[in-house]
Amino acid sequence: MPMIRARYPDNWDEIATRVKDAANWRCTQCGKPCRKPGVEWLHFAFWLMITHPEWFPMTSEGEEEKPQRFTLTVAHLDQDPQNNHPDNLKALCAPCHLRFDAPFRKANAYTKQEWFGQVKLEDLS
Ligand SMILES: [Zn+2]
């Protein structure tokens, strides 16, 4: 995330939906129930309040949570979008996916800097 579509298989949506269905549309990390595509936000928030009040979309400050936080995504554990073996795929809510990818993104940014010929710290000494 953000995903480069060309690196994913043509049937990625199908694969991803299968993983999300298998997870019962809950984040496998934090357990948060997520919103299926096409379900109105207000409808979802109301359903959540009735069925999972502990996840009612309000922060501790009483602010309404952002709908994006209730989007279920599918993470590649090895970061390779072409490795779609079920063992490599995990249904994660958007915040958990961001947290999961963060260390890899940092590593990628460094590799990219090297790729574009920017100096390394040891070159400066
Ligand atoms: Zn989560």
Image: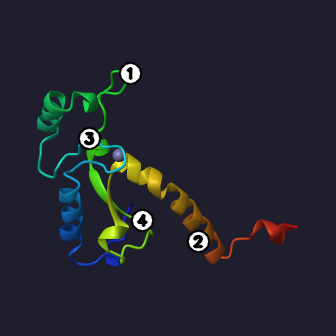
- Callout 2, which amino acid? Lys
Q: Quadrant of the N terminus?
A: bottom left
Question: Mark 2 Cα within 10 Å, few/some/many (few <14, many 20+)?
Answer: few
Of mark 2 and mark 1, the one earlier in the sequence is: 1
The secondary element bearing badge 4 is classed as: loop
Does the residue tagged 4 have its C-beta within 8 Å of any atom of ligand 1? Answer: no
Question: Mark 3 Cα within 10 Å, few/some/many (few <14, many 20+)?
Answer: some
The secondary element bearing badge 1 is classed as: loop
Q: Is residue 86 above or below residue 48?
A: below
Residue picked out by circle 3: 67
Q: Residue at x 22, y 27 (%)?
A: 53
The secondary element bearing badge 3 is classed as: helix
Residue reaching furthest to the top:
62
- Callout 1, which amino acid? Glu
Residue picked out by circle 1: 61
Label 2, label 1: how far apart the Cα atoms are: 39 Å
Label 4, label 3: how far apart the Cα atoms are: 25 Å
Label 3, label 1: how far apart the Cα atoms are: 17 Å
Q: Residue at x 37, y 73 (%)?
A: 81
Q: Nearer the viewer, mark 1 or mark 4?
A: 4
Q: Nearer the viewer, mark 4 or mark 3?
A: 4
Q: Quadrant of the C terminus?
A: bottom right
Q: Nearer the viewer, mark 2 or mark 1?
A: 1
Residue picked out by circle 2: 112
Q: Position of residue 34 (x, y in %)?
A: 23, 45
Q: Residue at x 12, y 46 (%)?
A: 39
Q: Is residue 66 above or below residue 123?
A: above
Residue picked out by circle 4: 77
